[in-house]
Amino acid sequence: MEVAAELRESRPDVNIRILDRGGSILSAFPGKLQEYVASWFRLHDVEMFSHISITSLEPGVIHNGVQPIFTDVTVWTAGIQPVDIVQRMNQPKDQQGRLIVNEWHEMPNAPQVYVVGDCSSQPHSPSAQLAGALGEQVAEVILARWQNKEPKLSRIKLKGVLGSLGKKAGFGLMGTTPLLGRIPRMLKSGVLWRSKRHFG
Ligand SMILES: Cc1cc2nc3c(=O)[nH]c(=O)nc-3n(C[C@H](O)[C@H](O)[C@H](O)COP(=O)(O)OP(=O)(O)OC[C@H]3O[C@@H](n4cnc5c(N)ncnc54)[C@H](O)[C@@H]3O)c2cc1C
């Protein structure tokens, strides 16, 4: 979404299409947020295609089953998968190929190995925010053991999601509350500024 919006603002002359497998863009988010983002794209002349299941790609053509979709440039943003070394590991994994870990983020068959981030099976979607929180928890576990104490970890609370739609608009989700418009865009600028300068 962010790439499409940035591209539109910098290049009003190109045709932009967003192809999505879901019934609408950002289908995991509340309807109000989806509708806001979709209306921004309609207003800015970005086409949205839902229920697209890409079966293959080649230069100039994306294949949606038997339907060809012609394109000059394709930007692939359809998700991530664990790195090769994890793919090759013969250890218990979830459906996304992420390693199953115990409550201390250790591999059950090799408790001296901690797993955090995108490779770790978690109830949340993979994100930098989650990877950071898991890293902090592993540090807590190691520190507690060092001090011969039983580690006590609290439930991870994520701060929410922020996205930009060009320079002036944005969207966000704080708990279950959608934020739309200029304020989430300003918050996102603040978050990016802080992370670039490594503020916590
Ligand atoms: C396009 C895109 C946009 C995203 N936007 C957001 C966002 O806005 N907000 C958000 O929270 N998250 C976002 N994410 C997700 C976020 O980037 C990841 O969830 C996060 O980086 C995971 O952290 P990690 O430490 O698990 O993995 P990574 O950050 O991928 O770090 C893994 C590191 O391990 C190294 N590595 C791999 N294999 C080996 C090996 N064999 N030996 C040594 N080193 C190795 C890699 O080079 C890499 O540096 C985005 C991801 C993508 C792809």
Image (spheres, rainbow, N blue to C red):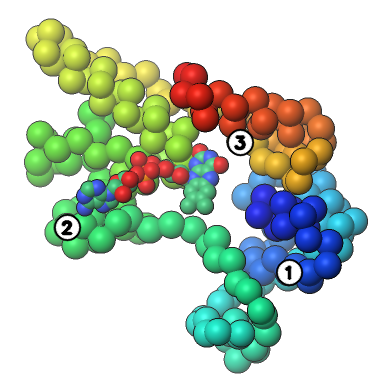
96 horizontally vs 67: left or right = left
Q: Point out residue 38 in the picture as x, y percentages from the top left corner.
A: 80, 55
The image shows residue 97 at horizontal and vertical percentages of 31, 57
What type is the residue that disc 1 sits on?
Answer: Arg
Residue behind mark 2: 89
Residue 178 in view here:
no
State left or right for residue 106 relative to residue 122.
left
Residue underneath mark 1: 17
Tell me which numbered mark, 3 or 2, is placed earlier along the sequence.
Answer: 2
Q: Which amino acid type is marked by label 3?
A: Val
Q: Earlier in the sequence, mark 2 or mark 1?
A: 1
Is the CB–ligand 1 distance for label 3 below 8 Å?
yes
Q: Quadrant of residue 146?
A: top left
Instruction: State the image coordinates of residue 194 (x, y, percent, origin top left).
Output: 56, 24
Q: Are marks 2 and 1 in contact (CB under 8 Å)?
A: no
Which element type, helix, strand or loop, lies under badge 3? strand
Depth order, front residue of 181/198: 198
Image mark for residue 132: none
Residue identifier under label 3? 161
Q: Nearer the viewer, residue 199 or 98?
A: 199
Q: Against 32, is 197 above or below?
A: above
